[in-house]
Amino acid sequence: MVTTEKGVVDDWLSEFKILPEASITNYASSLKERSSLVSAIYEVIQEPHSELLEPVCHQLFEFYRSREKLLRTFTLQFLPELIWCYLSLSSGRDLQSSGCIEALLLSIYNLFCNHVLEPRTYLKREKILRNLNVSFLEIMDDDGQSKIMAFTIPSLSKPSVYHEPSSIGSMALTEGALSQHGLSRVVYSGPHPQREMLTAQNRFEVLTFLLLCYNSALNFMPTVSLRSLCQICSRLCVCGYPRQHARKYMGIKNRVPVSSEFMVQLLTGIYYAFYNGEWDAARRALDDVLYRAQLELFPEPLLVANAIKASLPQGAIRGTKAGTKCIQVEITPASSRISRNAVTSMSIRGHRWKRHEEQETSIDSTDMANVVIPEISVTCVSGEKTVNGERGRALTENDVQAAQDSCVEPRTEGKPLADIRRQKSTLQI
């Protein structure tokens, strides 16, 4: 670690201890502008044998335990890198170096659902085993009961970003509709069990929940945190597989086990990174997730990753300095496309009559189409060409004879034309 970066971290560790309570808000607002400090903390986390790792983890725990939202967000931005360091050390059986990182991850997991706790000090892994009270009351409410998070499934009767209830026609008040009135399907998550230490059985249950905490604050995460998320996703998916040589990653060569739910949470962050300035890193991470999911035969990551890949635009989306972008959704128009007329017995009979009338009209038009209209020659000249260059129909012998009989003029009978007209007028009188 460079001496300059070490000095930046030392100053950061010392200044918070002497900071008065009234200045915490201004101090938290200034942290996001200190890019050199963020880079130095990343360097410390990436060196598990650094002497600054334990005090840095302790400071991050104090930030997350604080009631200041910006301080909690500052700690959450390092969560992907902390998870990667813990998993890489665990795969190499280096449990001693991962002790302080494991304690920090456990503390964040335990404090997420109920962060207003009595003051506690940051404990290393060995002290956690002796002081189990740090793992109690972590995911409980004020009454000491385990917290349960509820998620409401979208309903057509409730407004959402996809539709407006006013655009749907009024429904008939039937007995079934009245029984379902006001009911909404709710999915519950929890209660989450209290964890005293991370083991092979509960490791990814805790890490998946931590990624859920990270994804809940994605819109507050800086670009460097999104880039770190995409990079650790690629490392987790290719380490120990042939693609590691193609990616030219010279880190650990052991395969890091992952779970299906953990990969789905990674994909949530990757999808957000696509539209917020990290197109290339997110694209590479998405391909690596598909690669690992195909090898592990994980259906959920395969489904989500392929859906994300199919929805991506053709060209890359570059982030702007104006701020983060939101994932685009298409809003349904305000005009209603559904008929608002109530369905009654009279309307059903009217619809039935209208349908019968349409059928009779179609039958009449079909019969008229089958009637053959004979061709009549105006000049009574056989072989006359039809209009528009159409080829004349071949006449039979009877047709020719009938045409010749009808074409005999009155003059051939020896009577003048005026007499014939006179006879016709006499008959009319």
Image (cartoon, rainbow, N blue to C red):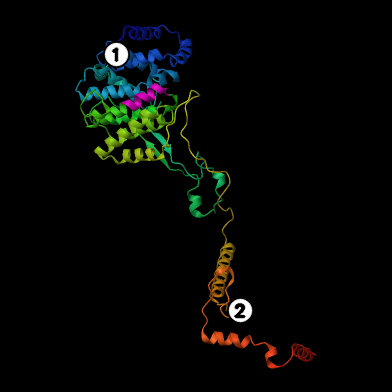
Q: Position of residue 148 (x, y in %)?
A: 38, 33
Q: Find out whether residue 224 is within the magenta segment.
A: yes
Q: Which residues are magenta?
A: 221-231
Residue on which the image places disc 1:
54
Kindly state the secondary structure of the residue where label 1 is placed.
Answer: helix
SS majority, magenta: helix
Q: Which mark is residue 404?
A: none
- From this viewpoint, is residue 269 visible? yes
User: Which residue ends up furthest to the right in the rendered image?
Assistant: 429
Q: Nearer the viewer, residue 105 or 273?
A: 273
Pointers 2 and 1 in contact (C-beta within 8 Å): no
Quickly name the residue at label 2: 377
Which quarter of the figure is the N terminus placed in?
top left
Mark 2 vs 1, N-terminal side: 1
Q: Position of residue 113 (x, y in %)?
A: 39, 27
Which quadrant holds residue 347?
bottom right
The vertical placement of 93 against 294, above or below, is: above
Compared with 246, 409 (above or below) is below
Residue 175 location (% of width, % of height): 50, 54
Amino acid type at mark 2: Ser
- On the image, the x and y values in percent for residue 256 come to 23, 29
Q: Quadrant of the C terminus?
A: bottom right
Give the residue at x 71% y 93%. 414
Q: Residue at x 26, y 32 (%)?
A: 258
Q: Residue furthest bottom?
A: 414
Looking at the picture, which amino acid does disc 1 mark? Glu
